[in-house]
C-alpha cells in the first residue's frame, strides 16, 4: 500500500532546497526462498515493502531501526547493488530502475556507498592507491596515472591520512583509518549522493565522533547528500535533518529530526528513543521495554507489523496496515491511528 499523496507533497521540496535529488516511491524488495532439486520458489523474505521517501540536495536523511528491518536493503536498492522487486527510484528525475547496466553506468559515479565493515570492504590485495583510484580509472579513462595518483594523495590528505598511505595495504591500518580510506574511495569520482551504511557502528566511540564530523565537513564543502543508515539514534540526531524509522520493512514514522526527537508518536519510535543513554542526571526519560522478538519477514503478521509487540495495540491493528498520516508538525507522518 503506497503512502498518501500528502506525504509525497510534503517530501517534494525541503526548506531551502531546490527539490529532491533522490526520490523513492513504493520501493519493494522480496527475496525468493528456493528449495529442492529444481530450486522452486517456496516463499519470500519480505525485506522492504512499499517504502517511499526523498533526499534533498545537500541534505542527510537518517534511516533507523533494529537489525533486520530492511535498512541496508533499502540503501543497496537505491544504488541497484540489489535489484528492487518493484517501485521507482528517481535520481535527478530519472528513473534508474528502468535503465540497463550500460545505461546505468554514467549514473554510478554520482551515487556511491560507504560500507559498514571497514575490514571486509577493502580488498586486502590492493594498495590504498589502487583502491581509491579504481573508480576514476573506470569513469575517467583519459586521465593520466600521474594525475590519478595526485588525486588520491589529495583525497588522503582531506580525510586525515598522510599521502604516503597510498603505497600501503589495508591490513596496516586501524578500523577508523580504514573507514577513512572507504570515504576517500567514495569521494574519488565526485559523487553528489552517498549511502552511508552504518559507517561508524564497527568503530570505537571516540573514533565514531571523528568520522561523523568528517562526513559533516565533507557535506558542507561538497554539497553532498547522504542516506545515513544506523541503529544508534544519538548519532542520527547529530548528523541528520530528517529521520525515517523502519520496522519490518515498513516506514512507521517520518519527520524532521527536531520534531521526531522532541515529539515521537509511534510506540516503536518511543521505545527506540527510550533506549538512548540519558544526557544528564536531570533527564527523567522512562525506559520502555518491548516484549517479544520482531516477527519473521518471511511470514509477517497481518495488519500493522508492530502490533504483536505494541503496548497500545487494539484488535483492529491486526486487520489492516495503517497509512502514514500527518500528525503534529506539517512534515511529521506516523503509521498509527491510535496516537492521534
Image (cartoon, grey):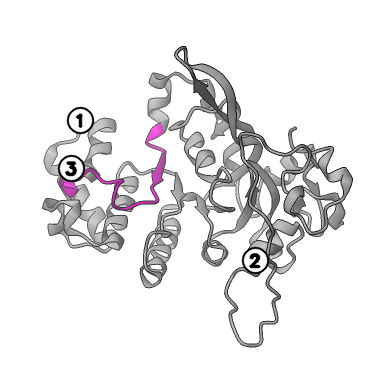
The Cα atoms of the two marked residues, 3 and 2, are separated by 42 Å
Q: Is residue 155 left or right of residue 221?
A: left
Q: Nearer the viewer, mark 1 or mark 2?
A: 2
Element assignment for label 3? helix
- Residue receiving disc 3: 130
Dot 1, how many residues are within 10 Å of its Cα: few (below 14), some (14-19), or many (20+)?
Answer: few
Horizontally, residue 145 falls left or right of residue 139, namely: left
**Residue at coordinates 26% horizontally, 53% vertically from top-left?**
155
Query: 304 or 121, which is in the foreground?
Result: 304
**Tag 2: Cα neighbours inside 10 Å, few (<14), some, or many (≥20)?**
many
- Dot 2 falls on a residue whose secondary structure is helix
Is 20 left, or right, of 321 in this rendering? Answer: left
The residue to which callout 1 is attached is 142
Figure quadrant of the C terminus: bottom right
Per the rendered image, the range of residues in magenta is: 108-130
Farthest residue, direction front: 36
Residue at x 34% of width, y 48% of height: 187
Estimate the x, y position of residue 171 in percent, counting from the top left: 18, 54
Amino acid at each position: 500500500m503506497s503512502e498518501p499523496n500528502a506525504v509525497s507533497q510534503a517530501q517534494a521540496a525541503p526548506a531551502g532546497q531546490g527539490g529532491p535529488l533522490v526520490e523513492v516511491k513504493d520501493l519493494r524488495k522480496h527475496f525468493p526462498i528456493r528449495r529442492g532439486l529444481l530450486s522452486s520458489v517456496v516463499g519470500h523474505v519480505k525485506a522492504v515493502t512499499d517504502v517511499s521517501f526523498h533526499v534533498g540536495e545537500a541534505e542527510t536523511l537518517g534511516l533507523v531501526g533494529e537489525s533486520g528491518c530492511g535498512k541496508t536493503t533499502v540503501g543497496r536498492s537505491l544504488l541497484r547493488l540489489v535489484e528492487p522487486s518493484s517501485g521507482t527510484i528517481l535520481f535527478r528525475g530519472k528513473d534508474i530502475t528502468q535503465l540497463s547496466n550500460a545505461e546505468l553506468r554514467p549514473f554510478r559515479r554520482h551515487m556511491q556507498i560507504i560500507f559498514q565493515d571497514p575490514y571486509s570492504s577493502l580488498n586486502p590485495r590492493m594498495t590504498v592507491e589502487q583502491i581509491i583510484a579504481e573508480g576514476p580509472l573506470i569513469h575517467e579513462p583519459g586521465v593520466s596515472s600521474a594525475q590519478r595518483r595526485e588525486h588520491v594523495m589529495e583525497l588522503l590528505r582531506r580525510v586525515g591520512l598522510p599521502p604516503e598511505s597510498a603505497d600501503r595495504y589495508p591490513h596496516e591500518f586501524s578500523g577508523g583509518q580504514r573507514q577513512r580510506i572507504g570515504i576517500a574511495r567514495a569521494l574519488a569520482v565526485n559523487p553528489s549522493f552517498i549511502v552511508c551504511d552504518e559507517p561508524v557502528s564497527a568503530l570505537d566511540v571516540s573514533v565514531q565522533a571523528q568520522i561523523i564530523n568528517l562526513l559533516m565537513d565533507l557535506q558542507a564543502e561538497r554539497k553532498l547528500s547522504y542516506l545515513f543508515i544506523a541503529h544508534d539514534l544519538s548519532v542520527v540526531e547529530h548528523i541528520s535533518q530528517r529521520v525515517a524509522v523502519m520496522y519490518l520493512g515498513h516506514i512507521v514514522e517520518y519527520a524532521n529530526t527536531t520534531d521526531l526527537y522532541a515529539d515521537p508518536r509511534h510506540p516503536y519510535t518511543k521505545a527506540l528513543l527510550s533506549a538512548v543513554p540519558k544526557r544528564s542526571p536531570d533527564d527523567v526519560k522512562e525506559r520502555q521495554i518491548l516484549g517479544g522478538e520482531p516477527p519473521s519477514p518471511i511470514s509477517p503478521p497481518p495488519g500493522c507489523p508492530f502490533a504483536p509487540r505494541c503496548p497500545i495495540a487494539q484488535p483492529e491493528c491486526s486487520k489492516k496496515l495503517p497509512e502514514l498520516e500527518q500528525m503534529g508538525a506539517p512534515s511529521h507522518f506516523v503509521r498509527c491511528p491510535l496516537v492521534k
